[in-house]
Structure formats: C-alpha cells, structure tokens
Amino acid sequence: MSRESLKKNIKNTIASSQEIVFMPRDFFYLSDRDQVGRVFRQLTEEAFLYKVGYGVYVKTKISKYTGKTIPSADLREIAEIAMRKLGVDVIPTISEQKYINRETTQVPNRFVLGVNKRVSRRLQIGKASIKYEKVR
C-alpha cells in the first residue's frame, strides 16, 4: 500500500470513528510499524491529531475562542480512555473515595488518576500532565 493511500485510509478511519483516542498499534493491520508511525507524525504536523504522550494521539477540533486546534476532550478523559486501551483499570483515588463518601469537602485534583498497577507513561497537554496514584 502506498504511503498516500495509507494516510488517506487512516485519516478516513479516524474521521469517521466515534472514538477520540488513537494509538498507532490500532492500525498495524494496515501496514508495518514504521509506515503507520510516519503517517501519525504527518497527521500531527497537519494538526489533524494531537500527540498527548508516547503512542497516544487525540482527535483535534478548532477552538471557538482562539481559532487554533485543540484536543477534542479534556486531559482526564483522554487519560482514562488511554489507560483502558492499555489494559490498566481506572479506579477512584483515595481522595476521590473520601469525597464520594462525604468524609471530606476537599474537591479532588482532576490531574490525578487512580490505577490498579504501576504506570510510567506520561500524558500531557501543554504544561498540564496526569499523575498516577496506585490504589488497591
């Protein structure tokens, strides 16, 4: 498959999909790792996709305030979807559990994600990044 037809095929698949988070490995059935990686890099340069972390890309949309392209979801939602795709369970953090159980009135931080196992993947949009809290 030529690179342009691969690019067109991946772009059409992403555009017609209801999902917002994509990983190159989702498209390895179309071609090899290198070609798919090049296509994702090109789509990022064209601002069709936004790279959030290693192997994690998000659909973009145009901001109604600045007119620039921005990710189509907030960082926490992106991180939750990405973790599920990577096989990591997302569970409430200790502070979220206390807030839900009305043990505290302190609102939990949105940039901390409760996970069931160790995660070393860094996900960020601009200067905002997700931290992980292992919860048993």
Image (cartoon, rainbow, N blue to C red):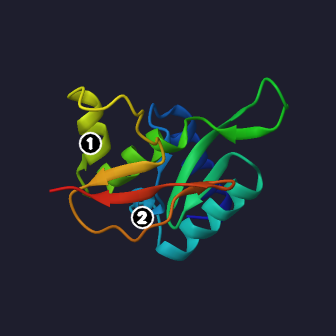
In the displayed structure, would residue 10 be above or below residue 73? below
Q: Answer left or right for 136 relative to 10.
A: left
Q: Answer left or right for 116 relative to 27.
A: left
Q: Which residue shows up at 49% across the image and 39% down it? A: 20
Mark 1: few, some, or many residues within 10 Å (few <14, many ≥20)? Answer: some
Residue sitting at the far front: 104
Q: Which residue shows up at 42% across the image and 64% down it? A: 28
Residue 1, x across and y down, in percent: 55, 64
In the displayed structure, would residue 11 be above or below residue 124? above
Secondary element under disc 2, as helix, strand or loop, is loop
Q: Which residue is mark 1?
A: 92
Report how far apart the C-alphas of labels 1 and 2 lie in the structure.
33 Å
Circle nearer the viewer, 1 or 2: 1
In the displayed structure, would residue 5 be above or below residue 55? above
Residue 116, x across and y down, in percent: 21, 58
Q: Which mark is residue 28?
A: 2
- Image quadrant holding the C terminus, namely bottom left
Residue type at mark 1 is: Pro
Q: Return the disc, 1 or 2, that comes first in the chain's sequence.
A: 2
Residue 42, x across and y down, in percent: 71, 60
Report how many numbered discs are placed on residues in the image: 2
Residue type at mark 2 is: Phe
Secondary element under disc 1, as helix, strand or loop, is loop
For the residue pair 113 and 42, the one nearer the viewer reads as 113
Residue sitting at the far left: 136
For the residue pair 77 and 91, the one nearer the viewer reads as 91
